Image (cartoon, rainbow, N blue to C red):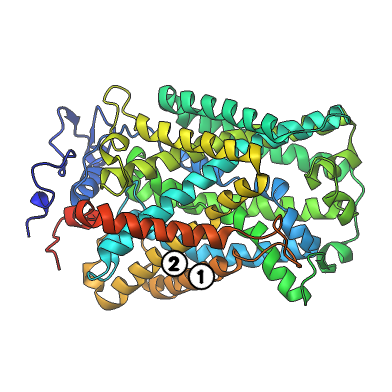
Amino acid sequence: MDSAGVMGKDTPFETRAPKPASYEDDGEEYHDSIRGHTREDRIDMARMGKVQELRRNYRPLSALAFTVILQGTWEVLMTATYQGLVDGGPAGLIWSFVWTWFGFSTVMLSLAEMASMAPTAGGQYHWVSEFAPPSIQKPASYFIGWMSTLSWQAGTASGPFLVGTLIQSSAVVMYPDYSPTNWQGTLMVIAVTILVWVLNIWGAKVMPVFQNVMLVVHIFGFLAIIVVLWVLSPRATAEVTFTQFTNSGGWSTTGLALMVGQLSAIYACICSDSAAHMAEEIKDAGKTVPRAMIGAYLMNGLLGIVFLISYMFMITDVEAALNDPTGYPHIWVFSQAVSPGGVVALNSIPTVLIFAGTLTFNLSTSRQTWAFARDRGLPFSNWIGHVDKKLQVPANAVTVTCIITIALSLINIGSDVAFNAIISLNVVALMITYVVSIGAVLYRRIRHPELLPSCRWSLGRWGVPVNIGGVLYSFHAFFWCFWPEGTPVALETFNWAVVMFVGIFVLSLVDYLVRGRKQYKGPVVLVEGYKGE
């Protein structure tokens, strides 16, 4: 079958990269002077049958900065460790982060190699379409596209919410009589989201510079907080910090509590694929993207473990930290070391960095959503998949992402339980995309290794064991993400991820049967050499 003609004449998207209007030829630095891509980028895009529609603004440093800021490991360990403290305590958090980091490294390495093989904004659903067994390529790719889109959309909604609640927590510190409300939090989410919308559409050209600046803040902010805590904060003993496990969730054993509490560590290690979704805006993506993913994971892992050990030393009373009026244990830790004004100053560091992470999260989410629409995987694909020719930005996808974030925040006014239920979809859905995409490349590597595309960053002979580790660890994380925080389970503590996951699965199945199976072909049909078998 001629892959260039699969979509027919009616498709609204070009399927082959046109010859550039102007270009420069300077050895390995050959690039389109308008789009900024290298010869290797053109080869990769041509092999995948994609048109270069976006400007490649990101270079190695800014690609690294982008991934580091989006993952924000030490910031997440500061602000999202409540469940880990309940189920495991300080020692549980430290040791669960250690095994999670090592386990997740196999996932990250597998994703990095696939990002080098096929550097496209689509990421997981594209890799499934290209590497899965032919008999299931189309439906499996469609399902993973939906899961990836909704996972990133849910994660994007959590960023502005976190920024808003951190601002509210600072207000509580300065004005103890202040009582935060859900509607105030929602207004902050809307304000943050509108700012993100403006910056990510009209400020796209300066985003790489912004990411570089935030990388500096990420490092020096970490140092500032660490130094203040070690100098001024009371500390627990090493024995308590490294060996005292808690089971405040009421589980039958401490081991089970540790498994449930590891979600905090998992949340701090996810989203390595963020760089892959920016691949079509990164120069020399086949080499730069995997290096950015690996570099960010190593940097964040090092900062994360140093911060976590320091942070856990400072939690001298777990119950008091968990019961802080702000709902954030780190605010209690800060208050033991400095004055209320100092607490606000220290809290402003993660607030600024998480806002920066919200910007990058929106960028990655909108690109993944745009790519899936470009392949006709979503309703209203023509509109969502449109790229503003002047700005060279998928402005409609950015707008859709911001609208979804605001819509979800409105749910929080009526019920924070319902809002948290939707947000819980983030990790669960992302894990299943990892399981299936890594499983697909493992299948291809074992059954038809000669069909794997060449790449400039390869696992080589370690491919099979690393892929197996990635599949097993992703499934391990997927399983434990469904568990509630503790027992007995009530409406407020029930983990709604299972309900949301099944609901989205049914919704995607219905959409596939009604619309998708007719309109969605899967990106593999555009791949060079595709024969429809």
Q: Label 1 crowding class (10 Å Cα cut-off): few <14, some 14-19, many 20+?
A: some
Q: Is residue 171 left or right of residue 164?
A: right
Q: Position of residue 425 (x, y in %)?
A: 53, 54
Q: How many marks?
A: 2
Q: Quadrant of the C terminus?
A: bottom left
Q: Secondary structure at mark 2?
A: helix
Residue nearest the observer in this picture, 419 or 92: 419
Q: In this figure, which residue is indicated by the disc labeled 1?
A: 475
Q: Secondary structure at mark 1?
A: helix
Q: Amino acid at mark 2?
A: Val
Q: Amino acid at mark 1?
A: Phe
Q: Is residue 339 left or right of residue 152?
A: right
Residue nearest the observer in this picture, 512 or 84: 512
Q: Quadrant of the N terminus?
A: bottom left
* Up/down of 229 relative to 518, above or below: above
Residue at 77 percent of width and 39 percent of height: 225
Q: Label 2 crowding class (10 Å Cα cut-off): few <14, some 14-19, many 20+?
A: many
Q: In this figure, which residue is indicated by the disc labeled 2?
A: 435
Residue 69 visible within the image? no
